[in-house]
Structure formats: structure tokens, C-alpha cells
Image (tube, grey):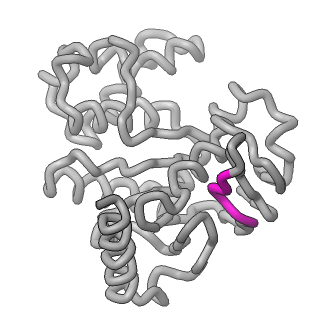
Amino acid sequence: MLTLERVSLTTKLGQQILKDISFEVQAGDRLAILGATGSGKTSLLRLLNRLGEPTNGSIYLEGQDYRTLQAIELRRQVTLVLQEPKLLGMTGRDAIAYPLKLRGMKPPEISQRLSTWIEQLRIPQQWLDRSEIQLSGGQRQAIALCRALVVQPKILLLDEPTSALDIGRASHTIGLLSELASSGQMTILMANHQLDLAREFSNRVLHLQGGELMQDLPANQINWERLRETFAALSQQALEEWE
């Protein structure tokens, strides 16, 4: 469904964010993108949603160079949920319904679609009537994920979707996402620093470090404990350099 060929990203100041990244994404993949802070995870997801353009290399959506697609058409097929989503000042309910209204869906169909996904994500009714500023970070994350799921994209890109959720809600969300991908309803790429949840979710892992792709392996071939130690060491190194 997605193919990246030697994709690199360099800032205007010459800092290289991603270096010669190549991989393929198959339909139904549950792909965990893992790496320490600053490894390039979010930058990669933003490129896939065309919130930026690669400096070098090519990205293909189902065999078509994604730069030949209009951005709005691409994003109807490839939807990104950021770690700190914006609800455009709307209530929870209006934010979830907004993309369906843009697609011209009729109110009864919108209501049915909302009901289905609100129930599956177990979003409390009181959240739906609150304005954006009345919602906590975790509540906004849940609403934003629901807003993405109601449009039923082919590919869902998630940047730390459970970072502000409590353990129970995070586990339920990961289980639902795993089920959606495993059943073939959508393909999901998820950046997540919570390794236990990433392990529970993924059938495949991309490990980024310093903008380079270090590993692309089935999840059952990953040495999770070594990966945890690597991330801890990199975090400690970054802290010492900052100090």
C-alpha cells in the first residue's frame, strides 16, 4: 500500500532528519515505529501525510507517486492523528462529525457512523458536549482518534496516540486498533514510546535511530528488552548532553 524508496529529509539549515529510508507497507500491517526522542518518527509520519515533502527519494501510494495526488485526496485515504491534536474550537461531538460533513454525508448517516465509533472507543457521552478547552489532553486524544476512525481511511497514521490516556483506556484502544488492522479494515502505522503497548499492537517493527532505519523486522523477531535498554541509554545520553 505504501512504498518508500531512499527517502531523506533535510531542514533548510542543513540538519538531516531522515536518511535514506526505504520500506514497504502491506495491507493490514500493524506497523510500530519505534525510536528514542529525536529519532525521526513524527517527521516520517508527517511526510506520509504530506505535511512535508522529502528532500530526496520517492513515496508511492498503491504504486502511484503520492506527489501526483492532490493533498486533500491523499489525506482522505491516509489520515494522521497527531500526539497533541487540535479540535478547531469545537465540542467533542462536532469535532468527530466535522470530516463527515465535509464529505457531504447526510445527518442520519453521520449520526449512525458517530454512534458506532463512539461506542467502540468507549467515549463517555459527557465528553462529547464539552468544548475543546474543557477537555483534558487524554480526552482530546480519544476524540481525535474517533474523528479519524469515522472516515474509515485505508491507512491510519498515529503519533503517540495513547501517551495521555490512562492504562485501561490505552490498552482498550490498542486492542481495538489491532483488531481493525488484523481484520483488514485498515492498515495502521503507529509511533509509540510505550514498548509494552507497541509489542501488544504490532506485527512488524521499524526501529529508527538518528533518522536512520536500524531494523525492519516482524515483531516476534525483535529483542524487546535490548530495545528498551537502547532507548534508555539514548535518553540518558541526551539528558547528560542537555545538562
Asked if residue 107 is positioned above or below residue 207 in the image, the reply reads above
- Residue at (22, 38) in percent of width and height: 138
Q: Is residue 196 left or right of residue 221?
A: left
Q: Position of residue 161 (x, y in %)?
A: 35, 48
Q: Nearer the viewer, residue 28 or 73?
A: 73
Query: Quadrant of the rendered structure where residue 109 is?
Result: top left
Whether residue 179 is visible here, answered yes or no, is no
What is the quadrant of the C terminus in the image?
Answer: bottom left
Q: Which residues are magenta?
A: 15-20
Residue 19 drawn in magenta: yes
What is the quadrant of the N terminus in the image?
Answer: bottom right
Query: Quadrant of the rendered structure where residue 73 is?
Result: top right
Task: Tally the numbered discs.
Answer: 0
Q: What secondary structure do most residues of the magenta stretch adopt?
A: strand
Q: Is residue 57 left or right of residue 35?
A: right
* Residue found farthest to the front: 243
Asked if residue 105 is positioned above or below residue 141 in the image, the reply reads above
Q: Position of residue 238 (x, y in %)?
A: 37, 66
Q: Position of residue 38 (x, y in %)?
A: 48, 58
- Residue at (26, 18) in percent of width and height: 132
Asked if residue 87 is positioned above or below residue 213 in the image, the reply reads above
- Residue at (14, 50) in percent of width and height: 166
Q: Is residue 120 left or right of residue 159?
A: left
Q: Nearer the viewer, residue 117 or 67?
A: 67
Whether residue 92 is visible here, answered yes or no, is yes
- Residue at (43, 10) in percent of width and height: 107
Residue 162 drawn in magenta: no
Q: Position of residue 186 (x, y in %)?
A: 54, 51
